């Protein structure tokens, strides 16, 4: 059965905006970040997702754990981060349409934190916010067929994957298939679903925007519960994705050194470009800064130059 939701004019408007931005991201090679930026995004994603669940470790501490350094902090918080690091390092191995893969991700994410990690719950549960019961999850005996239905919907329904990923996130939260870790699994699996079509979502920490709007996140979950319809949640999450892409497209060359910009160019796979194309990637640098960068790249042997004036082209030295 198809989950209940309505494709509103707002959903169509935001989906169109996201699609346009995804085109720009691909055109500017922003879906192929340098190793340093990839690492920074992974840290932000892990920090934001676990912060929502009450984890106290900072981005600096998570970076240290990622670099196999010793960190002092609550044992549970450190284990949560180590598990999340393992999961996000293996994120490309998960199949978005496989329950077996879904359970495997949960097993890795919650290993050592709960009993029976990776297994659907055998008990009935309710979700408490503050002193109030916010949600009574479906009976435990219904979980397996509800999750099977949800995965069938993701595989076979013809609605855009952007919308289906949001529906999955909400419906999984509603079903609450595990005893714990459902929130972080909802956010993780939406990323896995989106990555299947749009690789940029591996590096796009839109969870940091959920963290910034955490109150609204829970508000629309409750609103969707009350209406038995995930439309409010879809509208909210699509706007989060849209804002996150907008943030990525505001990627500022001024925040990077010349050496970091040249490293980025080296790693994104573009073999030849003009100064204008270089500035399209680093939108907020001046033409004189771009010229200095490219001159430095030539002098250091990173780039080769050909042509003159407005026909000047730059090529990576090893291409």
Image (cartoon, rainbow, N blue to C red):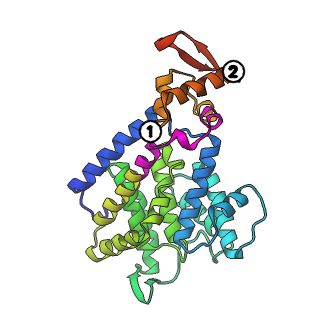
Kindly report the secondary structure that dominates the magenta region of the rendered protein.
helix
Answer above or below: position of 160 versus 138.
above
Identify the residue at image location x=59%, y=24%.
294
Residue 206 visible within the image: yes
The earlier-in-sequence mark between 1 and 2 is 1
Judged left or right of residue 52, residue 65 is right
Identify the residue at image location x=44%, y=63%.
210
What mark, if any, has residue 224 been given in the picture?
none
Q: CA gap, disc 1 to disc 2?
A: 29 Å
Task: Tell how many labels.
Answer: 2
- For disc 2, the neighbor class at 10 Å (few under 14, some 14 to 19, many from 20) is few
* Image quadrant in which the N terminus is located: bottom left
User: Residue 229 at x, y = what percent?
Assistant: 28, 68
Answer above or below: position of 245 versus 233.
above
Q: Which residue is mark 2?
A: 299
* Image quadrant in which the C terminus is located: top right
Judged left or right of residue 111, residue 195 is left
The residue stretch that appears in magenta:
244-262
Q: Which residue is mark 1?
A: 25
């Amino acid at each position: 059965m198809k989950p209940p939701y309505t494709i509103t004019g707002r959903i169509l408007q935001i989906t169109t905006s996201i699609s346009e931005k995804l085109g720009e991201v691909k055109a500017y090679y922003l879906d192929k970040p340098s190793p340093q930026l990839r690492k920074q995004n992974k840290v932000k994603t892990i920090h934001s997702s676990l912060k929502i669940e009450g984890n106290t470790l900072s981005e600096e501490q998570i970076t240290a754990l990622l670099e196999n350094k010793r960190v002092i902090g609550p044992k549970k918080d450190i284990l949560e981060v180590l598990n999340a690091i393992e999961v996000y390092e293996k994120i490309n191995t998960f199949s978005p349409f496989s329950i077996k893969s879904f359970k495997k991700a949960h097993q890795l994410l919650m290993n050592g934190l709960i009993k029976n990690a990776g297994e659907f719950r055998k008990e009935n549960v309710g979700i408490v916010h503050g002193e109030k019961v916010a949600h009574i999850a479906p009976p435990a005996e219904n979980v397996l067929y509800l999750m099977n239905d949800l995965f069938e919907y993701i595989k076979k329904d013809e609605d855009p994957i952007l919308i289906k990923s949001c529906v999955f996130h909400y419906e999984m939260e509603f079903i609450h298939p595990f005893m714990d870790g459902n929130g972080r699994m909802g956010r993780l699996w939406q990323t896995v679903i989106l990555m299947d079509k749009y690789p940029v979502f591996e590096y796009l920490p839109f969870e940091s925007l959920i963290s910034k709007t955490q109150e609204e996140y829970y508000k629309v979950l409750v609103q969707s519960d009350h209406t038995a319809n995930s439309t409010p949640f879809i509208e909210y999450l699509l706007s989060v994705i849209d804002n996150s892409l907008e943030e990525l497209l505001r990627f500022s060359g001024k925040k990077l050194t010349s050496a970091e910009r040249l490293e980025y160019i080296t790693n994104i796979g573009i073999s030849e470009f003009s100064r204008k194309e270089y500035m399209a990637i680093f939108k907020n640098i001046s033409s004189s800064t771009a010229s200095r960068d490219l001159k430095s790249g030539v002098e250091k042997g990173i780039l080769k130059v050909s042509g003159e004036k407005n026909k000047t082209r730059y090529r990576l030295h090893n291409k």
